[in-house]
Image (cartoon, rainbow, N blue to C red):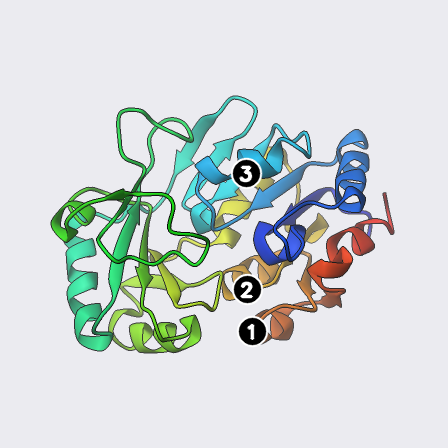
Amino acid sequence: MEKPLLIASDVDGTLLGPMEALTERTIGVVARVTEAGVPFVLVSGRPPRWIAPIANPLNLTGYAVCANGAVLYEVGTDRIVAVHGMLEPTLLHDAVSALDHALPGCRYAAERIGESALDPEMRNFVIEPDYHNPWGDNEGTQAPRAEVLGHPAIKLMISRRGMTSDEMALAAREVLDGAVDITYSTNSGLIEVSAHGITKATGLAEVAERLGVPAERVIAFGDMPNDVEMLGWAGHGVAMANGHRLVLDVADEVTAPNSEDGVAQVLERWF
């Protein structure tokens, strides 16, 4: 493709190495990208409260697409710019009722959003007892299920020990597909439910429209099923060699794995 006018990258498994850290090579190429005036946009399943540890070392202050497209966040001002597809309590209860029959033994968590990454007026991440987070069980406010499901959320998280996310998603789609969107960013027994039609692609498209960049001049990087729509939307979609088979199938190109700075290897063609 021509030199991209906008670069979008997933974070975990893509921009970060296996130890969940940024390498000097990646930091260097992102610096050259932004010095050239090209926006570099983080597009992640992460909520806004998990963006600063990545954006700050990269000196990124512009937009980040969070929660799989549900939230557009401005890093430099710590401001929630837009929220799309809130899951209302009635839908949350209906989804959980269906999942309890299809996947007995699940535990649930809800991600909520205010006006900034961490809103003192609300509990941003609420979990029910025994909810398991593959990234570590050291955050979240524990609450009864009724409280977890009792307020609007940008994302419902479902964990189940002893199953892969692939297996969980297959079972969940049989009872929920069409009502909500189901995806995952790890295969360690965690799936994510978002409002129907809200994906990383819709979030990135909003950023591109705000910046006046056509889709064909956007390059996007990803590794997991929640990146599939984004790689398909972008003018050039790049999968990591360590990526899920669904991502490898849809990509225009496969780069080196995240352990070998696959994102940097591609961007160094232009920057």
- Classify mark 2: residues with Cα within 10 Å, few (<14), some (14-19) or many (20+): many
- Classify mark 3: residues with Cα within 10 Å, few (<14), some (14-19) or many (20+): many
Marks 2 and 1 close (CB-CB < 8 Å): no
- Classify mark 1: residues with Cα within 10 Å, few (<14), some (14-19) or many (20+): some
Which numbered circle lies on residue 224?
A: 2
Q: What is the CA distance from the residue labelled 1 to the residue labelled 3? A: 24 Å
Q: What amino acid does circle 2 point to?
A: Met
Task: Work out whether mark 2 precedes mark 1 in sequence or the reverse, and give the earlier one.
Answer: 2
Residue 99: which quarter of the image?
Answer: bottom left
Q: What is the CA distance from the residue labelled 3 to the residue labelled 2? A: 18 Å
Q: Residue at x 59, y 43 (%)?
A: 42
Q: What amino acid does circle 3 point to?
A: Ala
Residue 143: which quarter of the image?
Answer: top left
The answer to which of 135 and 258 lies nearer the viewer is: 135
The answer to which of 162 and 268 lies nearer the viewer is: 162
Q: Residue at x 29, y 57 (%)?
A: 131
Residue topped by disc 1: 246
Q: Is residue 258 above or below residue 155?
A: below
Q: Residue at x 86, y 47 (%)?
A: 270
